């Protein structure tokens, strides 16, 4: 049996844009799968204002393990404006992320990194009041991960339960998968008529999303010319 050492996910806060934030993004490199946190990996409960409110979906570990096996880096990108709204501390976000990472690691599912945005443009807390580049659907967190891990965003995926996650994918050139957990079903049923662009894929939950992504990667894209269709 192949026993792999358990690695702890790196917990990091998305930093303000640095001097090198303008340097070009890697155009080559492996794709990654970016996951929303609340409503995608764990239950959407409004705001996670206590770590006891973290409930990882029972299928999440299997989904992430499959991505690990396919050697696709898995990176969490999460808006946590509850910090800026004064509902909970940034420390709680870190604790919650650590709890999720450890629960998944106990089931051999590995997350490469966590990024979160604690800001809000009209936040009551001045130190977090910011029209930042990291709040989804802005692409700051994905770009920081791309530079850090040498990822190609254009061949990457974003899985999330909000249309905002699909917009994040559109804005970064990645492909989007909307899951029906969390806010997904409600957003899809009640708001899709107003969406200027539909998500690239729909999925029941994170595991279904991962299976669709891996299945799509195994088969040639319907848009590419397959050998049998090529004109002679
Ligand atoms: Mg969500
Ligand atoms: Zn931010």
Image (cartoon, grey):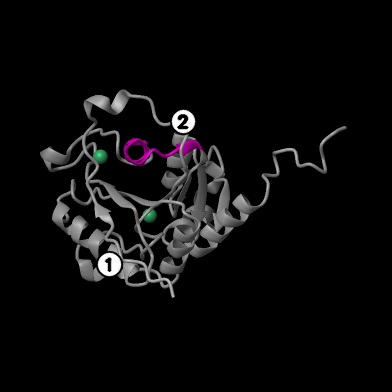
Q: Quadrant of the C terminus?
A: top right
Type of secondary structure dominating the magenta stretch: helix
Which dot, 2 or 1, sits closer to the camera? 2
**Residue 36 tag number:** none
**Quarter of the image containing the N terminus?**
bottom left
For image coordinates 67% across by 51% down, the residue present is: 219
Q: Quadrant of residue 53?
A: bottom left
Q: Residue at x 42, y 66 (%)?
A: 60
- The quarter holding residue 141 reads top left
Q: Position of residue 147 (x, y in %)?
A: 34, 35
Q: State the residue position of label 1.
A: 102
Within 8 Å: ligand 2 and the Cβ of disc 2?
no
Whether residue 88 appears in magenta in the rendering, the answer is no
45 versus 187 height, above or below: below
Q: Residues within 10 Å of mark 1 (few under 14, many from 20)?
A: some
Name the residue tied to disc 2: 27
- Using the numbered discs, state the Cα–Cα distance from disc 2 to disc 1 in whole angstroms: 32 Å
**Regarding mark 1 in the picture, which secondary structure is present there?**
helix
Contact check, label 2 and label 1, Cβ < 8 Å: no
Q: Which residues lie in the magenta part?
A: 139-154
Residue closest to the eye, 88 or 171: 171
Q: Residues within 10 Å of mark 2 (few under 14, many from 20)?
A: few
Image location (x, y in percent) of residue 36: 38, 53
Quick one: label 2 or label 1, which is nearer the N terminus? 2
- Residue at the location (25% across, 33% down)? 131
Q: Residue 105's x, y, as percent?
A: 32, 67
Decide if residue 41 is on the left or right side of residue 174.
left
Q: Secondary structure at mark 2?
A: loop
Task: Tell which quarter ligand 1 is in.
Answer: bottom left
């Amino acid at each position: 049996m192949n026993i792999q050492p358990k690695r702890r996910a790196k917990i990091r806060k998305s930093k303000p844009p640095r001097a090198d934030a303008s340097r070009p993004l890697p155009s080559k490199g492996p794709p990654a799968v970016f996951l929303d946190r609340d409503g995608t990996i764990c239950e959407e409960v409004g705001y996670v204002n206590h770590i006891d409110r973290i409930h990882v979906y029972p299928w999440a570990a299997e989904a992430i393990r499959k991505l690990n096996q396919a050697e696709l880096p898995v990176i969490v990108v999460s808006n946590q404006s509850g910090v800026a709204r004064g509902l909970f501390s940034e420390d709680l976000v870190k604790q919650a992320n650590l709890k999720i990472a450890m629960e998944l690691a106990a089931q051999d599912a590995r997350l490469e990194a966590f990024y979160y945005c604690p800001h809000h443009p009209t936040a009551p807390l001045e130190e977090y009041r910011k029209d930042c580049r990291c709040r989804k659907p802005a692409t700051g967190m994905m770009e920081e991960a791309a530079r850090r891990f040498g990822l190609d965003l254009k061949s990457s995926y974003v899985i999330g339960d909000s249309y905002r996650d699909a917009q994040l994918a559109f804005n970064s050139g990645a492909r989007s998968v909307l899951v029906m957990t969390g806010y997904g079903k409600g957003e899809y049923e009640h708001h899709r008529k107003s969406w200027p662009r539909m998500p690239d894929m729909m999925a029941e939950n994170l595991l279904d999303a991962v299976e669709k992504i891996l299945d799509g990667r195994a088969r040639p894209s319907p848009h590419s010319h397959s050998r049998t269709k090529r004109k002679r």
